[in-house]
Amino acid sequence: MRLLAPLTTLTFLNLMSRRNILIKEGSALEGLTRVNTILFDKTGTLTLEQPRVGNIYSCNGLSEDVLLAYAAAAQNRQNHPVARAILSAAEELNLTLPETEEGQYEIGYGITVFLDNQEVKIGSGRLMKNQGIDIPDEIKSVQKDCDFQGYSLVMVAVGGELNGIRTIK
């Protein structure tokens, strides 16, 4: 019984992502029991039915195009809405994606792949924290602003060092 609830939850999160329903955090699901009103703003996700890449913030020397190419290459075999947004942005810029070796995907955290003989992690702040990757103060500031605006963040770390983030609107 202890395994049944988490496994069922993961199964349904996976099924929902295949139907373009994206759950940002588990606490959002827990809070649904207290919701009595839902308000929607029209930022494009509801009207366009697909999230899109917003701003890209680079740190530690990688260019925005390289960050996007790495993220797109890592997400190339994924089918969730955020992966499609990243791949679409890379396609619009005609970026050449590097070859990836087999990756390890963790639902709700992100993916780890090897690109250009380097370990690349693409995912949430939780993934970076769990992997012991420091988030620079400049990125923490951007992270607070994006959280306040309701944007999702996708972080890119290469070789154990955070190199940038992308907002998903």
Image: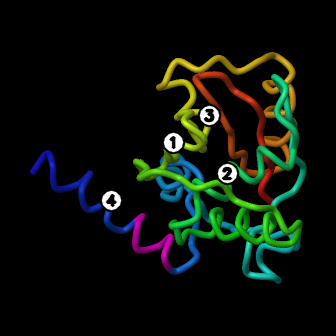
In the image, which disc is placed on residue 125? 3
**CA distance for labels 4 and 3:** 21 Å
Which amino acid is tagged 3? Gly
Q: Quadrant of residue 76?
A: bottom right
Closer to the chain start, of discs 1 and 2, is 2
Q: Judge depth for marks 1 and 2 and give the one in front.
A: 1
The magenta region covers: 13-18
In what element is the residue under mark 4? helix
Q: Is residue 156 above or below residue 31?
A: above
Which amino acid is tagged 4? Thr
Closer to the chain start, of discs 2 and 4, is 4
| Badge 2: residue crowd in 10 Å (few <14, some 14–19, many ≥20) | many
Q: Judge depth for marks 1 and 4 and give the one in front.
A: 1
In the image, which disc is placed on residue 9? 4
The residue under label 1 is 114
**CA distance for labels 2 and 3:** 15 Å
**CA distance for labels 1 and 4:** 29 Å
Q: Is residue 61 above or below residue 17?
A: above
Which amino acid is tagged 2? Ala
**Is the Cβ of the residue at disc 1 closer than 8 Å to that at disc 2?**
no
Q: Position of residue 133 (x, y in %)?
A: 59, 20
Closer to the chain start, of discs 2 and 3, is 2
The residue under label 2 is 71
Q: Is residue 125 left or right of residue 78?
A: right
Residue at image position (52%, 47%) is 110
Q: Position of residue 157 (x, y in %)?
A: 64, 32
Q: Is residue 8 above or below residue 147?
A: below
In what element is the residue under mark 1? strand
**CA distance for labels 3 and 1:** 19 Å
Most common SS among magenta residues: helix
